[in-house]
Amino acid sequence: MTDNEERMPLTFAEVYRRARAAGGEAFPPFDLRRGLNDLRTWIDREVDVMEDLPSAAVRRSQPELRGRHDLLAELVTLARRPAEGGPAVLVGAGGSGKSTLAAALTQRARSWDRQVWWVSAADPANFFEGLTTVMSDLGGSTTDLESIANGAADGPDRLWRLLERSPRSWLLVIDNADDPWILAAADSPAGVQDGRSWVRASQRGLVVVTSRETDPRMWVGARLFAVGQLDEVDAAQVLRDLAPQAGNESEALALARRIGGLPLALHLAGTYLGSGLAQSHTFAAYHRALGSREGTMVARTAEISLDGLARQGIPQARTLLRLASCYAPEQIPTRMLSMSGLKEALDGLTGVGLIRSDSAAITLHPVVTATHRDRLEGPEVWRTAVAHLVGALGELSHSQPECWPEYRLLSQHLLALLDTAAEHGDHEHLARLADATAGVARAFNHSGAFRAAGMLCRIALDRCVALGEEHPAVLRVRHQLAWTVANRGDLTQAETIYQEVLDIRRRVLGDSHPDTLRSRHESGWIASLLGDLAEAEQRYRDTLRDCVLHLGPDSRDSLTTRHELAYAIARQGRLDEAQPIFEEVLRDRRRVLSDLAPQTLQTQHALAWITAKQDRWAEAEALYRRLLDLRQVLEADHPHVLLTLHELAWTIACQGRWSEAETLYRQVLERRDRTLGTDHPETKATRYALDELLRGKIIDAEHPA
C-alpha cells in the first residue's frame, strides 16, 4: 500500500436511505448501517452538540410556544410519571414546531431538577456523539463509551443500564430523527420496534423523539403526538409576539390566515417585520407582498426577507443563501462561504431568521435548505459550492489524525453536492467531486473507518457515472474502494478491483504514471496478503525500480514500496536481509516526514516485529510499549493500536507471563470483534491465538504489511 494511501468511518440519515434504496449486493442494509456506525469515532469535537437544552441561538430562532399547551400538558404528565407511558414521539412536517415543543418540555423538566440531555439525530455522527455525552454524564466506563463510538450491538443495552441506575430522574430529547432506523441497534433487522433500540420506556425518565416520519408502524410501542399546524388565533399571536408594532389583532389574523399555520413560515414573516428591514412594517403590507409571489409559503416569506435585505444594501445575502443551500443544512463552515460582504450577509440573514450563525459556522433549517436548493437557477452557484468545498478539503492532510474530525464534518457537505451532481454537474466539476471523494475516503481509511469509506466511494461512483470508467478521478475512487474492501477482509474482491484499475491505468496513463505506480504497488500488497510472497517481492522490486527512476528515492511512494519490500522479504524468513532495509527506511522517513508521522510509526512497528521474530522478547516488548505511547493520538480501537496490542500479547506470552497475555488477548478479541466483525481475518487471528494459548501453545503473530 502507498504512503499516500496508507492502511489505516457517513453522515446524515438521507445518505443511509439512499444507500439502502440502491439495494443489491453492493449495499446490504446491515453492512451499510455498520459502515455508518464506524464513522461515530471520528466526530468533530467542535461541532455544537446540544448536551442539555438547545443553544441560545436555537431558542432565538424558535417562536414562543403557541397552540401546543394541551400537547405540552400531556408530555409534562408523561415526564413526571414516565412509567405510565412513553417513549414519546412528536411527529409532523418540517417546520411545524416539534423542536419548539420539545424545548418547552425541557425547560419544565429543568425546573424539577431533572437531568436533561438534548441530542441531535439529524445525522449518525452527531447522534452518537450526543449519546456518548449522555453516557459520560452517567459515569460510563471506557468500554461503555467505546461501544457507542464503534457501533457495538450492545451499545443500547449499556446506555440503558446506566440510565436505569441514574440517581436523578431525567429527560432525553432526540431531535430530528427523521429516519427511525438511526435509533435501531446495530444488528437489528426490525428497527425501533424490537425493544432493543436506543429508544425505550423507563421508570427513571422519559425519552422524547421528534421526527417527520408519521407512519405509526415505524413507532410501535411509542406514544405518538401529532404536531400539526397552528390555528388562526395562535398563528396570529406568533406574528404579534415577533412584531408587536406591525398592526392590530385583526390585521395579524388576516395575515395568519393568508400564511397558514406552519410555525416556520410564521416565524420568518414575524422576524422580518420585527427586524426593521421592511419598507412598511405592517401586517397588511406584508399580506399584499405575499400576493405577488409564487411557491410554497416558506419560499415566499424567505424571498420577502431577501428582498428587504437587498433594499438595505445587502443583495449578496440572496447569493449567500443559495450557496449555503447547496450543502447539508447543519454546521456549514463560514470559510466555505467566502464572498464580498460576507459579514454583512451573515448578519442580515441571521437578523431575519433565515440562518443561525456563530463565528465559525452557520446552520439552516432543513426546509429552508430544500426550498432554496429547488430555486437554484443554473449550475453556477453549485459549481461555486464545489470549488469552495474542494478548497477547504485541500487545506487538510489525510494522514494526520488531527484532521480526521474535519474530514468527517466536511463529508456531509460532499454528500449533499454528490446528491445534486446529476442535475448541476459538468464533467469538470464531477471530476472534482470524485477526486474529493477519493481524498475523504483516504482519510477515512487512515482513521480505520473502512466501511464508511467504502460506502462513500460507492455513492460517488454512482453519481459520477457520466465520467466513464477510464476517467482518472473515477479510477482514484475505485482504488480507494479496493483498499476498503481489502481492509474489511475480502481480499479476492479487492484483488479484482485493483487489477481492473491497474489494467486501465496501464493502458490509459502508461506504466510510469504515479497513479499506475500506486496500482502496481497495491498489486504487490495484495499478493503478499494472499500469501504469494515471492510474487509480491518481485512486484515490489519492479515497482521500486520505476518509483526511484520517475519519482525519486525520497518520494513517499518509493519509501513505502521499500518498506513493504522489506516486509515481503521478512515473511519469507530472511530476517537478516529485511532488518537493515527497515532501518534505512526508518532513517529516511524520519528525515523526509517526521518521527511521529504514521508512516514512520509503521516502520517502527515492523522493526518491533522483526525483533520479536529474532526471539529478543524483552527488547521487542519495550519497542511495542513505546509504540503504543507514540500512537496515543489514535482512537483506542484503531486497527493499528489493536495490532500493536495483539503482538504485545504474543511477546508477553513468549516470556512466560501467560495469564497477562491471556487477559490482553481477550481485550483485543473483544474490541476487534466489535469493530471489525467476528469473521474478519484479524479477529480470527486473535481468537485462534487465544484458543491455542489456553491449550498451552503460543502462536506467532503474522504482522500484516
Image (spheres, rainbow, N blue to C red):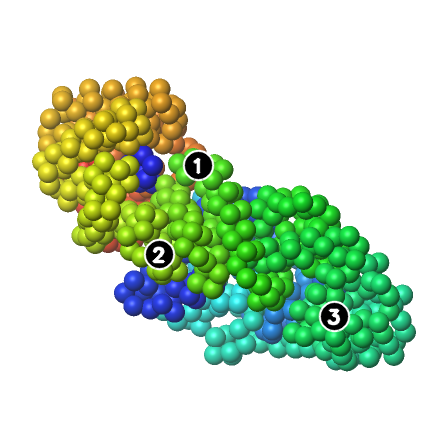
The residue identified by callout 3 is: 266
The residue identified by callout 1 is: 397
Label 1's element? loop
In-front residue for pair 684/507: 507
Which residue corresponds to the image point at 48% horizontal and 45% vertical from the top-left? 390
**Residue 439 position in % (x across, y down):** 40, 44
Side (left or right) of 534 relative to 505: left
Of the 4 image quadrants, the one containing the C terminus is top left
Which residue corresponds to the image point at 29% horizontal and 62% vertical from the top-left? 26
The residue identified by callout 2 is: 467
Label 2's element? helix
Q: Mark 2, residues whose alpha carbon is within 10 Å: few (<14), some, or many (≥20)?
A: some
**Residue 665 position in % (x across, y down):** 27, 41
In-front residue for pair 173/472: 472
* Rendered position, 617 above or below 256: above
Nearer mark to the viewer, of 2 and 1: 2
In-front residue for pair 141/213: 213
Which residue corresponds to the image point at 25% horizontal and 20% vertical from the top-left? 584
